Amino acid sequence: MTEPLVLGIETSCDETGIGIVRGRTLLSNTIASSMDEHARYGGVVPEVAARAHLDALQPTIEQAIAEAGIRLQDLDAVAVTSGPGLSGALMVGVGAAKALAVSLEKPLYAVNHLVGHIAADIVTPDSEPLEYPTIALLVSGGHTSLLHVREITTDVEMLGETIDDAAGEAFDKVARILGLPYPGGPQIDRAAVGGDPNAIRFPRGLSRASDMAAHRWDFSFSGLKTSVARWVEQHEGEDLPVADVAASFREAVVDVLVTKALDACEERGVPRLLLGGGVIANKRLREVALERAAARGVTVRIPPLSLCTDNGAMIAALASQLISSGRRPSTLDFGADSTLPVTEIQVAERP
C-alpha cells in the first residue's frame, strides 16, 4: 500500500490548523491564529474563536495545498478533530471537513485531539518511529493529561488529568495577577528571567500522601493560582519581586508535571516519555524534564514546538496511522464532542 496523502483540519480552540502529510512525511503545517483577538479579553472567547475559524478556513486550506505542492483531488483522505475542545470551534471544523470529503468523494476520519498530539511526533522530520508503550504528558491551555500509550491507533489509557485549571490556564491567570498581558505562558517565562525559583514555596497540588489514593496521576493548579494571588495581596504596597514570584510559580507547575510523569514511567515500567501541547514551549519545563529523566533512565521525546501547539498536521498524521493499520473511515454520523474521552481515538468508524 502506498503511503496515504491526508489533509487534517484542527479547530478545537483558537488556532485554525491545516496539515498535509504523506505517511510519516510532513508536507505542510499551516496555522492561522486568532490569539491577538482574544488578547483583548485576557483569554479565549469561544464565539470569537468560532467566527475566526470561519474566516480562516478557506485561505488556510489554500495556503496548505500550495505549500504541499498538491491538488485537493490528489488527497487519499480528509481528517478532522471531533473533540475534545470548544463546541462552537469544533463544529466549524467538522462541518468543513464533511463538506470537503463529500465534495471530493474522499474518505473522512474523525479523530481525537489529544491523541493527535501524540501523533505529532510521528511526522517530526528525521525522527525514529515512535516506540510503544510510552507515557505521554500533554500540557496546553485547555488540557493537562497524563496518558499510557500502548499503541496509538488502538490502546490509549488516560492515567490522570487536571481536575480544575489546566496548566496553561494557570499561567494565564497568574500572569493577570502579576499585571502581565495574555497569553500568560511566554509572559511568565520572560518575567521569571533572573528570578529565584526557590524564593517562595508555592504548593504542589495533589502531591501529598493523602492525595495518592484518589488522585495519583491527576493535576490541580487552582490552589496554586490562589496561593500566588494571596501572596501578592499580602505584599500589596511593597516593591513586588515579580521575577521571584514568576519563577517560583513556574517551578511549582514544572515540579508537579515532571514528577508525576516520571513516577508514571517508573510505576508502569515504561522508560519513554513523550511531551506535547503548547505549554511544552516553556523552556524551564523542557530543561527539568530532560534533566530528571536522564537521571532516572527515561528517554524523552519532544516534537518541534511548531508541532506541539494545536495543528492540523497532527490530525492528518493520526489519520494516516489509522489508514495504514487498516481502520475504516468514519461515517458522516458524528458531530463535535467537547468532552470526547481519549479512549475514543477514532469516532464513528464504519461498520
Image (tube, rainbow, N blue to C red):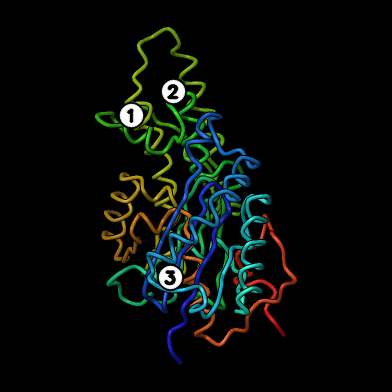
The first of marks 1 and 2 along the sequence is: 2
* Res 304 seen here: yes
| Label 1 Cα crowd, 10 Å radius (few <14 / some 14-19 / many 20+) | some
Q: Marks 1 and 3, how far apart in space?
A: 34 Å
Q: Marks 3 and 2, how far apart in space?
A: 37 Å
Disc 2 on helix, strand or loop?
A: loop
- Left or right, residue 324 beside residue 345: left
- Between circles 1 and 3, the one closer to the viewer is 1
Residue 3: numbered disc = none
- Between circles 3 and 2, the one closer to the viewer is 2
Tell me whether circle 1 and circle 2 mark residues in contact (CB < 8 Å).
yes
Which amino acid type corresponds to the residue marked 1 in the rendered image?
A: Ala
Q: Whole-percent x and y of residue 295?
A: 26, 59
Residue 178: numbered disc = 2
Residue 191: numbered disc = 1
Q: Marks 1 and 2, how far apart in space?
A: 9 Å
Residue nearest the observer in this picture, 34 or 124: 34
Residue at 59%, 63% (x, y): give it.
Answer: 81
Q: Quadrant of the C terminus?
A: bottom right
Q: Whole-percent x and y of residue 63?
A: 43, 59
| Label 2 Cα crowd, 10 Å radius (few <14 / some 14-19 / many 20+) | many
Which amino acid type corresponds to the residue marked 2 in the rendered image?
A: Leu
Which amino acid type corresponds to the residue marked 3 in the rendered image?
A: Thr
* Res 135 seen here: no
The first of marks 3 and 2 along the sequence is: 3
Which residue is at the far left?
194
Disc 3 on helix, strand or loop?
A: strand
Relative to 311, does residue 268 appear above or below in the rendering? Answer: below
Q: Quadrant of residue 277?
A: bottom left
Which residue is at the far bottom?
1
Q: Which residue is mark 3?
A: 134
- Left or right, residue 183 beside residue 344: left
